[in-house]
Image (tube, rainbow, N blue to C red):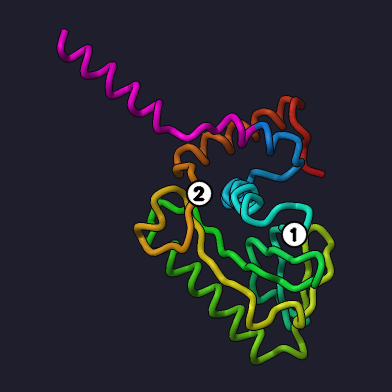
Amino acid sequence: MRFLLFFASVLFSISAFAADTEAYFEALKQSGINYEPDGAICEQVAKLHYSEEYPAGPFLITTGVEYSTGVLTLGELDIVVIDRATQKVVLVSEVKCWRNFQQALDKAKSQRLRFQWNLEKHSQQMQFDSYEGLPFNVAQFDSSTQYRSLSQAGGVKKGFDAELELTLSELKQLRMRLLKCQAWGECRRPE
């Protein structure tokens, strides 16, 4: 009997502290995003996360901004926040939701340094391509641009600047639910 009470209390505790993925599902189900790539769900939840700090009126948040020197793509910026009034980029965030926090953090730092190095060394040749078709130029990035790393829940303790409230497992469950919903035609499919 004591075992059953203990087991029930553990289950209740886990469910009481688990993040509510329903709100994220509702917010993302009509996005039309292709959730096949593993990182897509993390970037979209990160976009929602940053919208609290950077509301849609004065700011624009986008994902997947590729940069190059004209020939080959050098990298991609996961999250970019633009101040609508000044058109300046106020935040660039590398988003990594990986099982191994240290490898993820190392990758995020490496990507940040690569972008900053290319921005400094090849500013005249830098070109940007946004999935949403937004125009970008080097002048939008300056000394006031913040750079952050963001992970799933638990990443701040491992060195990330910020973290989502969802665990890696919850992100995977949300991704699968969105993929199924799109497959069944109940959610907007990618174009």
Residue 10 is situated, as x and y percent measured from the top left of the image, at 28, 24
Query: In the rendering, which numbered label is found on residue 59?
Result: 1
Residue 138 is situated, as x and y percent measured from the top left of the image, at 75, 81
As drawn, is 146 to the left or to the right of 185? Answer: left
As drawn, is 132 to the left or to the right of 119? Answer: right
Q: Is residue 50 magenta?
A: no
**Point 39% across, 50% down: residue:** 154
Q: Is residue 16 magenta?
A: yes
**Point 72% across, 58% down: residue:** 62
Q: Secondary structure at mark 1?
A: strand
Q: Quadrant of the N terminus?
A: top left
Which residue type carries mark 1?
Answer: Phe
Which residue type carries mark 2?
Answer: Leu
As drawn, is 22 to the left or to the right of 134? Answer: left
The residue labelled by disc 2 is 164
Quarter where residue 120 is shown: bottom right
Q: Secondary structure at mark 2?
A: loop
Q: Residue furthest top?
A: 1
Is 167 situated above or below 115?
Answer: above
Q: Quadrant of the C terminus?
A: top right
- Looking at the image, which is closer to me, 27 or 36? 27
**Point 64% across, 47% down: residue:** 48
Quarter where residue 126 is shown: bottom right
Tell me the magenta residue range.
1-25
Residue 127 is situated, as x and y percent measured from the top left of the image, at 78, 78
